[in-house]
């Protein structure tokens, strides 16, 4: 493309004739495939596409159907809690709340526990940018220059760690799952780590280097909405604390839609939960911290399995089936047209 | 302030007039006063920088520029600001700058500040670099030119020393040798030529390769020795620098206050080359940028194509759409915000804690949206902006939409090879039958000749081959044809140095044999030889005793050979003019010179009695010449003569004029050799054969001189003082040349004033257009009715009849007349003329007056008819173009009969056509006639309608009313009425009904007015094609101007947008390249709209799900690079290479052109359908991933990734669907783009942990590449998005194939099938036509019925105003009613209808703006700018060039490229 401009011969050499060279390119006579889009030539493509889409669609629907999912709205389950959280001055008052539910059948396989939020516009432009990736990498940076404003420093100049609106608004409910087996209550073992992307946990998020975490975050303060500083996010596991806390990392991966879910825990497949969650009565014990009434939102807790094609959303499969059908039908229609025309020998005979 | 100037001017005028009348008598003081006040005013004073002038020189000249030139636009310092300033002149750039600035406002910052700047910066940088490089090459060129060396007189060293051009100042003396380029405009003070003549070649100025004469200032030419600058004590006063190349006014004031007028004949222009003159000395009057050449060097002109204009309106639509989208976003955001009574987490308050009220937030959001959604159109603008840079190629697509062609006749439709066909002398016609036969046989030879030229294209060595031939030519016997080729290569030989890049090396100065060889008419030759033999005895007596007819014949041929400005030269030394040189000045003399010298002496001595020997030998039979010649050859064994003898020995050449001279030479050489020079024999070898070459300013002149030569009335030499004619019967006659009144378009004639050597009387020979000449003839009433008067009257009548006949046969006619003046008359006239010549201010008018005073009372000698042959392939081309639905108008300066006949010859008019001739004296009559004609046409077509319905209803092939064909012929004077505002509309209505319009006697101005009228009123695409200076204005006015590299220089080509070498190349240019360019560009433009709308809408849809907050789900880098990198190359390839139908089929089926003419590919509906499709595709592309990922834990950039990837696939595959032909380049580019996208996304995803806050697509692509859902989503999205368009194209291809598609289908057939199919197609058309035809014949009764009806109209009108004839059928049928009309017309001739420049001396109106690039460097810079301009146009150019060249169309631009 670039060197195709005919190179002008230098003055001084034997002056060539003014006739440009007779190459296929310059004469625009490259061998070309000239597709002629007529029914006869493209008929097969419609049927092939149709068949392919139908088969993929069926596969997708089948796999999606195997997904078991249960979703519980708990935003109003403990009305007192939600009332309490409406007033932000009660930020440090604890409020607990239990939600009972029943599994009618076993949920086999890996079971994932999500929290879901509705009407929370995490994708708001100014919200999305309100973070400092450099800070989260553990670097000592001047966050004043970042997009964190107004959640950068307190009035006295103490920087917030982590800064920005995303971190500040982190989902801070804690949810535990209990299995009520014959009046005995067994806490379902849940995995706190391994829920985030490996690259996020190991590359994108780093704690500042220091001999211990609290000293690493010395001179910084927690974001205003937080109850505890960042180095106390998980006091039990050193490798899940500070910026590399899985819950934090997942929250920081800003959701695409206003209604979304984030992976919270995974059911650890040990003991009686080795095959998944058995049918029966379960209870969620939730420490209710995250206010949703402020933005007219809801919050959910979701238990779900996952297949290769994602979650329980059947859209893709249906879409494939529909478009496959459409393509096949179109194929039939144009075949009819084709046959009719051929009978009349009307091709290019006008 | 104004008063002193006015006063000064008044004084000046007084000064001039008094100066003219009584010499210099005005007071010294006023003179001084004037000068001091005027140095900066209208005139400039040039004083040599020497001795006593020193102080005054410094005072006067410090304001004058020196010769250093700077054509660069920028300097190192001002490059950046100035370039930016220029670039921000473009609205698009300004708009984007505004957006960038907007992004710096924190409230509405949608992107990171720096990233938004990227596209703008990239575009600005690319253009700045391009401008910079262009400018740098200009700078280098300037430097090179400034440092050229020339010889300047140095006061210190008292001699001429080498100086750089840039150090030349006004007032310097410069000495130039032969073949040197003139560094500045200077007044010629000395020429080594004895006659004070300097020859210059102006090829670099106007492309004319013939030599121009320049004359030493009067008073200096008599000096024998070279002028000594030390002694030069005069001052020169001339006009201030201006750009009028054809005009220079001033005077030299000697120290004794004598004044000598200066004209352009005394001025050597910068950039020209000195030829044939050993040395010249001049004084610089204008230097550097004040030279006329530089002042003429205006930049290229820009035209905007129709498509571009259309696109601009559509861009406006897109902007409107954008604003609508932004408004939606803003309002949506406001509403969304107002839903919340409290501050949600995600809505970040201002740093001061306050929240913005929803309305204000909405307002802010509007601007944010604009930034967010702005990155459409961006790339597009970059493209158009750069394409505007190049001079002509931005309108290449217009070639596909031409509806009207305005064609010049001479040189465009015809070859402009003038062939002498007929003459009429003293009322007796000589029809030259044999000459006509000869021409027939040349038809074939000529085409052969062109074939051979075809073959030579491509071999880069043909030139050197020719040169080799040339060297050997004298020794080798050559056949006629190769000699012909040789003569074509002479100019190239003569211009080996530097100037060799003239546009067309051959056929300008040297005529082809078809023009030079004239077979004399037997009858005339016989009469002529009788005169010759008689003349000897009678010449000593009074010439009145000759029979009147004989005298007429003699005078006629004398006039033919004298009354011109032809330069005589010898072919072997092409630019070495024949001159008379005094003995002893040069040691070795050529044979020719000796001979001439001898003759001159003898002629002077014997005055009126020629050498008897000459007479004898000329009356001998040709065979004896040959025998004598052979003896001579044996004796001298001169190789030069050998070749000549060979040539002369050819049977059909035996009577060619050279031979008659050889014996003569023999004699003289012998004499000379024996008595003067011992080395004469050696000189013979160097000498040239007396095969004279005539370099004429117009082909007509050459043709006449050659014709005279055929009758042995041979123009031997021409100097400013005298003309030598070798007259067969009288020997060499040397006429003292008193005056030449050059041709101009107002007078339409030229005259020479000579002193007849025989009668010693002053004789005026005039030749000119018959329309003017007939009025200037002596009328019988004046002196009474003696015999000769009666005779003259009769001659006049008969000649007029002959003239009409010639015109009807399509010949160009000229009248030849003479006038004998007494010395007293002459002296009186001379006095007036001298006054006129020396005046500065209104010299033109005075000169014109003076000329008119001279050219009266003429005696008509006869008339000539010169044929201008049609170019090859013209009728075919015209038919094809007409089939393509293009209306062709012929605009010519020729007279009506000639024009109509040429129109018939080239099938512009068909014998079946009804011809309406508009010819009215008054505007009202004109209006009446036009409305009557219209009525008639409407009646006939209305009557035809029912029968038309019976026929084929399918699309008719012709645009005009089917089955009805009418031609309109209109002449210049009527044209003037018609072009009046009130009649324009009816005229256009009328022309729309006619299939051809012929405008004759149109001035260049009228041509351009007509073009403008059609262009503006009918909103039609116009193309003007022409070859001469008189077509320049029309070429510039038309949407597309095509220049033909003709015989009349480069002016038309310089003004044109495209240049072809032959009219027939228009066919391919329009039908193939026009079609391609148009379809490609329209498709590409539509594609760009589609692409941007589709892509931007993705962002728009997302706004509905992010609270209209202006978030983009794609990373900014990818977003911006998407248009700039990933999807930019395939469309360009598509725009360059796509070929819907092959060239062969396009050529065979001109009907296909009508598709693009109606802009089928770019209807408003197409635009909106494209936009609709874009909307649909973006909807699919957004919502399939949306629903797939709805409610999942997907993050924002992971959601954007499949959308973006799918968009890439959709956009690229959409292109493939639209592509008409796919080559490996398409494949490579498409696959390459996809790969590039993935590689980039992967690499970016792997590295950008924190480099790119806040958007952070870290590892997203990698994650997706392992996710089957990603692939499934992309696949489904692509399929669903493209399905409708695919289906549409399939159905269109099957059910309603457009002609283009059907033609495309033909490409796929085997050659036999193809031939069959094309034939069938054509048959279809013929059937259509036939149906039309039947319709015509069915209604022919009505048509014929209309004729008498019209005739009755004509008879209703007063006969004096008989304005038109329904001249049906045959133009050759003699219509006597023409005659009075013609005479009427000639009665009122004034400057309105300037005839096609028969003599082409000057056409002021065109000169000024056509010498666009004065030197080769200017051309190169144009070239450079084109090279750097956008790839698309370049490729188009390359395509145009190469393919046209393939058939020997040497495109002008190819030349620039080389």
Image (tube, rainbow, N blue to C red):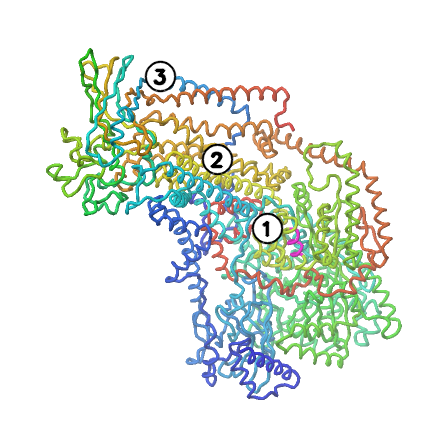
- Residue B1141's mark? none
Labels 1 and 2 within one chain: yes
Labels 2 and 3 within one chain: no
Where residue B436 appears, as percent x and y from the top left, is: 75, 53
How crowded pointer 1 is (Cα within 10 Å; few <14, some 14-19, many 20+) is rated as many
The residue depicted at 50 percent of the width and 67 percent of the height is B180
Compared with B1143, B651 (above or below) is below
How crowded pointer 3 is (Cα within 10 Å; few <14, some 14-19, many 20+) is rated as some
Q: Which mark is nearer the camera, 2 or 3?
A: 3
- Residue B1174's mark? 2
Q: Which mark is nearer the camera, 1 or 3?
A: 3
Compared with B283, B1197 (above or below) is above
Q: Mark 1 lies on which chain?
A: B
Where residue B115 appears, as percent x and y from the top left, is: 34, 45
Q: Mark 2 lies on which chain?
A: B
Q: In this orientation, does residue B1447 appear?
A: yes
User: What residue would you read off at disc 1?
Assistant: B1040
Q: Camera-side residue: B422 or B1364?
A: B1364
- Residue A65's mark? 3
Instruction: Name the secondary structure under disc 2.
Output: helix
């Amino acid at each position: 493309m670039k060197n195709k401009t005919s190179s002008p011969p230098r003055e001084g050499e034997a002056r060539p004739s003014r006739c440009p060279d007779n190459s296929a390119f310059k004469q625009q006579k490259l061998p070309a495939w000239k597709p002629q889009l007529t029914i006869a030539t493209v008929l097969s493509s419609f049927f092939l596409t149709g068949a392919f889409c139908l088969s993929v669609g069926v596969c997708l629907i089948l796999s999606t159907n195997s997904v078991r999912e249960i979703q519980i709205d708990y935003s109003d389950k403990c009305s007192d809690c939600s009332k309490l959280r409406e007033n932000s001055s009660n930020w440090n008052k604890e409020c607990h709340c239990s939600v009972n539910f029943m599994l009618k059948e076993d949920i086999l396989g890996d079971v994932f526990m999500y929290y879901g939020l509705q009407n929370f516009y995490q994708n708001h432009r100014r919200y999305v940018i309100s973070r400092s990736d450099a800070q989260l990498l553990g670097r000592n940076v001047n966050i004043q220059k970042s997009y964190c404003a107004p959640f950068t420093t307190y009035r006295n100049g103490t920087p917030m760690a982590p800064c920005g609106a995303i971190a500040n608004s982190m989902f801070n409910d804690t949810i535990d799952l209990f299995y009520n087996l014959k009046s005995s209550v067994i806490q379902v073992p849940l995995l706190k780590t391994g829920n985030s992307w490996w690259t996020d946990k190991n590359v994108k998020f780093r704690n500042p280097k220091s001999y211990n975490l609290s000293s690493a975050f010395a001179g910084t303060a927690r974001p205003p909405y937080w109850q505890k500083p960042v180095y106390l996010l998980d006091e039990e596991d050193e490798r899940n604390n500070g910026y590399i806390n899985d819950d934090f990392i997942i929250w920081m991966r800003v959701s695409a839609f206003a209604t979304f879910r984030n992976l919270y825990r995974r059911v650890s497949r040990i003991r009686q939960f080795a095959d998944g969650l058995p049918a029966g009565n379960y209870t969620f014990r939730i420490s209710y911290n995250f206010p949703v009434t402020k933005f007219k939102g809801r919050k959910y807790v979701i238990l779900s399995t996952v297949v290769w094609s994602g979650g329980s959303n059947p859209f893709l499969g249906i879409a494939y089936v529909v478009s496959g059908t459409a393509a096949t039908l179109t194929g039939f229609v144009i075949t009819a047209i084709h046959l009719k025309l051929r009978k009349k020998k009307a091709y290019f005979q006008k | 302030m104004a008063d002193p100037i006015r006063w000064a001017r008044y004084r000046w005028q007084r000064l001039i007039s008094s100066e003219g009348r009584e010499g210099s008598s005005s007071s010294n003081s006023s003179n001084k006063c004037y000068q001091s006040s005027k140095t900066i005013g209208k005139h400039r004073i040039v004083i040599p920088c020497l001795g006593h002038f020193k102080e005054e020189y410094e005072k006067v000249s410090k304001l004058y520029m020196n010769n250093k030139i700077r054509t660069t636009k920028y300097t190192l310092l001002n490059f950046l600001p100035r370039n930016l300033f220029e670039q921000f002149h473009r609205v698009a750039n300004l708009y984007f700058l505004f957006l960038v600035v907007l992004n710096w406002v924190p409230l509405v910052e949608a992107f990171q500040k720096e990233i938004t700047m990227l596209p703008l910066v990239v575009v600005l940088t690319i253009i700045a670099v391009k401008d910079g490089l262009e400018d740098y090459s200009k700078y280098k060129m300037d430097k090179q030119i400034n440092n050229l060396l020339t010889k300047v007189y140095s006061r210190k060293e008292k001699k001429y020393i080498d100086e750089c051009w840039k150090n030349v100042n006004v007032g310097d003396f410069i000495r130039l040798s032969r073949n040197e380029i003139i560094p500045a405009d200077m007044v010629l003070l000395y020429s080594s030529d004895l006659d004070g003549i300097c020859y210059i070649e102006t090829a670099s100025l106007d492309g004319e390769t013939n030599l121009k004469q320049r004359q030493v200032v009067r008073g200096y030419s008599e000096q024998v020795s070279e002028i000594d600058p030390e002694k030069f004590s005069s001052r020169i006063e001339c006009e201030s620098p201006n750009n009028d190349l054809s005009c220079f006014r001033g005077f030299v004031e000697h120290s004794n206050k004598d004044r000598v007028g200066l004209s352009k004949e005394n001025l050597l222009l910068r950039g020209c080359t000195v030829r044939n003159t050993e040395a010249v000395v001049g004084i610089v009057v204008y230097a550097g940028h004040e030279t006329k050449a530089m002042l003429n060097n205006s930049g290229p002109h820009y035209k905007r194509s129709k498509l571009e204009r259309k696109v601009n309106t559509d861009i406006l639509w897109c902007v409107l759409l954008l604003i609508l989208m932004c408004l939606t976003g803003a309002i949506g955001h406001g509403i969304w915000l107002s839903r919340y009574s409290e501050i949600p987490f995600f809505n970040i308050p201002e740093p001061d804690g306050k929240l913005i009220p929803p309305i204000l937030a909405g307002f802010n959001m509007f601007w944010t949206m604009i930034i967010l959604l702005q990155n459409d159109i961006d790339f597009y603008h970059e493209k158009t902006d750069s394409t505007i840079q190049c001079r002509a190629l931005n309108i290449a697509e217009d070639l596909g939409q031409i509806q009207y062609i305005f064609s010049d006749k001479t040189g465009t439709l015809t070859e402009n090879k003038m062939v002498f066909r007929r003459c009429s002398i003293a009322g007796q016609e000589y029809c030259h039958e044999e000459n006509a036969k000869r021409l027939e046989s040349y038809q074939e030879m000529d085409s052969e000749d062109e074939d051979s030229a075809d073959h030579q294209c491509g071999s880069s060595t043909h030139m050197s081959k020719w040169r080799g031939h040339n060297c050997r030519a004298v020794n080798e016997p050559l056949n006629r044809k190769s000699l012909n080729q040789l003569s074509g290569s002479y100019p190239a030989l003569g211009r080996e140095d530097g100037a060799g890049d003239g546009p067309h090396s051959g056929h300008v100065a040297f005529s082809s044999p078809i023009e030079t060889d004239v077979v004399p008419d037997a009858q005339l030759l016989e009469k002529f030889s009788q005169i010759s033999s008689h003349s000897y005895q009678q010449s000593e007596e009074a010439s009145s005793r000759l029979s009147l007819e004989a005298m007429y014949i003699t005078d006629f041929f004398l006039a033919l050979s004298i009354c011109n400005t032809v330069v005589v030269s010898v072919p072997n030394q092409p630019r070495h003019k024949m001159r008379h040189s005094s003995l002893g000045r040069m040691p070795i003399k050529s044979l020719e010179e000796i001979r001439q010298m001898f003759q001159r002496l003898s002629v002077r001595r014997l005055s009126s009695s020629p050498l008897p020997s000459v007479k004898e030998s000329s009356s001998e039979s040709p065979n004896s010449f040959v025998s004598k010649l052979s003896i001579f050859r044996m004796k001298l064994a001169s190789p030069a003569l050998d070749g000549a003898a060979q040539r002369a020995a050819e049977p059909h050449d035996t009577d060619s004029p050279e031979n008659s001279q050889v014996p003569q030479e023999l004699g003289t050489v012998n004499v000379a050799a024996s008595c003067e020079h011992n080395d004469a024999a050696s000189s013979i070898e160097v000498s040239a054969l007396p095969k004279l070459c005539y370099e004429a300013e117009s082909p007509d002149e050459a043709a006449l001189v050659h014709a005279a030569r055929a009758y042995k009335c041979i123009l031997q030499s021409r100097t400013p003082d005298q003309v030598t004619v070798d007259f067969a019967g009288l020997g060499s006659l040397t006429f003292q040349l008193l005056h030449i009144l050059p041709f101009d378009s107002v007078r339409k004639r030229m005259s020479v004033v000579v002193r007849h050597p025989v009668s010693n009387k002053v004789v005026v020979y005039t030749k000119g257009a018959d329309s003017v000449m007939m009025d200037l003839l002596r009328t019988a009433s004046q002196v009474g009715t003696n015999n000769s008067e009666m005779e003259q009257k009769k001659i006049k009548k008969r000649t007029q009849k002959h003239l009409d006949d010639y015109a009807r046969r399509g010949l160009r006619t000229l009248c030849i007349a003479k006038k004998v003046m007494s010395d007293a008359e002459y002296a009186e006239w001379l006095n007036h003329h001298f006054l006129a010549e020396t005046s500065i201010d209104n010299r033109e008018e005075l000169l014109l007056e003076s000329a008119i005073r001279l050219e009266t009372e003429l005696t008509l000698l006869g008339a000539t008819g010169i044929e201008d042959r049609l170019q090859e392939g013209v009728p075919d081309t015209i038919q094809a173009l007409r089939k393509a639905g293009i209306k062709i108008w012929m605009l010519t300066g020729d007279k009506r009969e000639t024009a109509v006949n040429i129109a018939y010859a080239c099938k512009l008019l068909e014998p079946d056509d009804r011809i309406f001739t508009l010819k009215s004296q008054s505007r009202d009559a004109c209006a009446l006639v036009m409305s009557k004609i219209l009525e008639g046409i409407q009646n006939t077509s209305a009557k035809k309608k029912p029968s038309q319905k019976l026929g084929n209803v399918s699309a008719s092939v012709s645009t005009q009313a089917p089955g009805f064909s009418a031609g309109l012929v209109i002449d210049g004077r009527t044209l003037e009425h018609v072009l009046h505002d009130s009649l324009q509309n009816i005229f256009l209505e009328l022309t729309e009904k006619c299939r051809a319009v012929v405008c004759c006697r149109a001035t260049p101005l009228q041509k351009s007015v007509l073009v403008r009228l059609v262009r503006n009123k009918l909103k039609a695409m116009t193309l003007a094609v022409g070859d001469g200076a008189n077509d320049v204005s029309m070429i510039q006015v038309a949407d597309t101007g095509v220049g033909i590299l003709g015989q009349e220089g480069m002016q038309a080509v310089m003004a044109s947008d495209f240049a072809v070498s032959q009219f027939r190349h228009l066919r391919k240019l329009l039908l193939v390249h026009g079609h391609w360019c148009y379809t490609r560009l329209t498709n590409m433009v539509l594609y760009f709209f589609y692409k941007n709308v589709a892509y931007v809408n993705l962002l728009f849809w997302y706004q509905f799900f992010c609270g209209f907050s202006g978030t983009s789900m794609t990373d900014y880098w990818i977003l911006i690079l998407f248009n700039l990198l990933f999807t930019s190359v395939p469309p360009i390839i598509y725009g360059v290479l796509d070929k819907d139908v092959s060239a062969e089929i396009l050529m065979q089926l001109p009907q296909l052109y009508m598709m693009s003419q109606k802009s089928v590919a770019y209807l408003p509906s197409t635009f909106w359908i494209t936009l609709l499709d874009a909307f649909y595709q973006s909807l699919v592309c957004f919502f399939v991933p949306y629903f797939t990922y709805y409610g999942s834990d997907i993050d924002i950039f992971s959601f954007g990734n499949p959308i973006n990837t799918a968009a890439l696939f959709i956009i690229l595959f959409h292109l493939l669907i639209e592509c008409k032909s796919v080559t490996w380049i398409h494949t490579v580019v498409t696959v390459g783009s996809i790969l590039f996208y993935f590689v980039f996304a992967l690499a970016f995803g792997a590295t950008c942990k924190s480099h790119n806050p806040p958007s952070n697509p870290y590892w997203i692509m990698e994650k997706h590449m392992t996710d089957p859902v990603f692939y499934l989503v992309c696949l489904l999205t692509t399929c669903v998005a493209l399905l409708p368009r695919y289906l549409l194209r399939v159905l269109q291809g099957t059910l309603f194939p457009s002609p283009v598609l059907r033609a495309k289908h033909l490409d796929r057939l085997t050659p036999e099938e193809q031939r069959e199919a094309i034939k069938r197609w054509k048959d279809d058309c013929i059937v259509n036509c036939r149906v039309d035809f039947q319709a015509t014949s069915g209604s022919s009764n009505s048509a014929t019925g209309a004729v008498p009806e019209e005739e009755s109209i004509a008879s209703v009108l007063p006969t004096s105003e008989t304005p038109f004839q329904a001249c049906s059928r045959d133009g050759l049928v003699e219509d006597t009613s023409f005659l009075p009309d013609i005479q009427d017309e000639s009665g009122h001739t004034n400057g309105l209808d300037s005839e096609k420049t028969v003599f082409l001396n000057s056409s002021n109106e065109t000169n000024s703006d056509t010498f666009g690039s004065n030197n080769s460097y200017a051309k190169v810079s144009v070239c450079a700018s084109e090279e750097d301009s956008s790839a698309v146009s370049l490729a188009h150019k390359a395509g145009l060039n190469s393919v046209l060249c393939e058939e020997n169309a040497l495109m002008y631009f190819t030349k620039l490229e080389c």
